[in-house]
Amino acid sequence: MKFTFLGTGTSMGVPTAGGFGSERLKGDPRDERWRCSAWIETEQSSIVIDTGPEFRLQTLRAGITRVDAVLITHEHMDHISGLDDLRPFCYKQKQTIPVYTSQTCKESIKRRFEYMFGPDRYPGATSVELNVIEDSFQFQDLRITPLPANHGKVDVLGFRVGNISYLTDVKEIPESTEKLIKGSEVMVLSGLRWKPEHPTHMTIPEAVEKATKLEIPRTYLIHMNSRVNHKQSNQRLPEHVRLAYDQLILEVD
Ligand SMILES: [Zn+2]
Ligand SMILES: [Zn+2]
């Protein structure tokens, strides 16, 4: 299974519009972070997790030519606003693309993208089918397990796909979900910044503590803000935790 980080940045992206924080980037391309999204590719399947504001650019940058399914973590715009850019894939593949998410997120997507659904559907609009998932399911050659977690008052879904557990925009992970993550070879987990603590996101030290507790051999952090320097952060992190960066590719069994 090939896993590509399409984006690893926090909600505003890094650098942000207007240049706030860009003075810290110092020319390392790993410090430029588009909004969080990931691409999983196997012999039979090509699926993406989240479709944020850079989704079109991310598909072109990574060379994605097919999208069989989409997993959506939650309804914040940095994770769903690119849904409309599935349109060329619908045309090319001549199909409705299945989207898997929670009940709350499904309702939110229907409200925000009302022109894609219902009797007043705009002709030619993106054609997606919204599926609510509560348990593990098989999609082609992939076993997918939803990982419910908390993002402040917002519920989010992480996803375990084979041996990778992907969780973004997480503050708390309930014990029942920790059991589902355990045994993963790789965990992807959000870590907003080193400090101070944040009410709805784990900081990097909180993410490291979780990765260590769950005994995951390799953890990659995502959803970092513009204050997080890639090189300096990796020097501070324990060996089993690394900062991810856009276009990083992992091969996982
Ligand atoms: Zn986010
Ligand atoms: Zn969020």
Image (cartoon, rainbow, N blue to C red):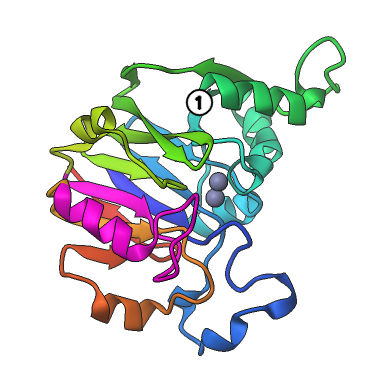
Q: Residue at x 34, y 48 (%)?
A: 3
Which stretch did the figure color magenta?
A: 185-213
Residue kind at label 1, given as amino acid type: Thr
In x, y percent, where is residue 90?
64, 28
Q: Quadrant of residue 161?
A: top left
Q: Residue at x 12, y 49 (%)?
A: 215
228 vs 60, left or right, is left
Numbered label tally: 1
In x, y percent, where is residue 178?
23, 35
Q: Secondary structure at mark 1?
A: strand
Circle 1 is placed at which residue position?
101
25 vs 44, left or right, is right
Q: Is residue 199 magenta?
A: yes
Residue occupying the far top of the picture: 119
Nearer to the camera, 67 or 22? 22
Q: Quadrant of residue 57?
A: bottom right
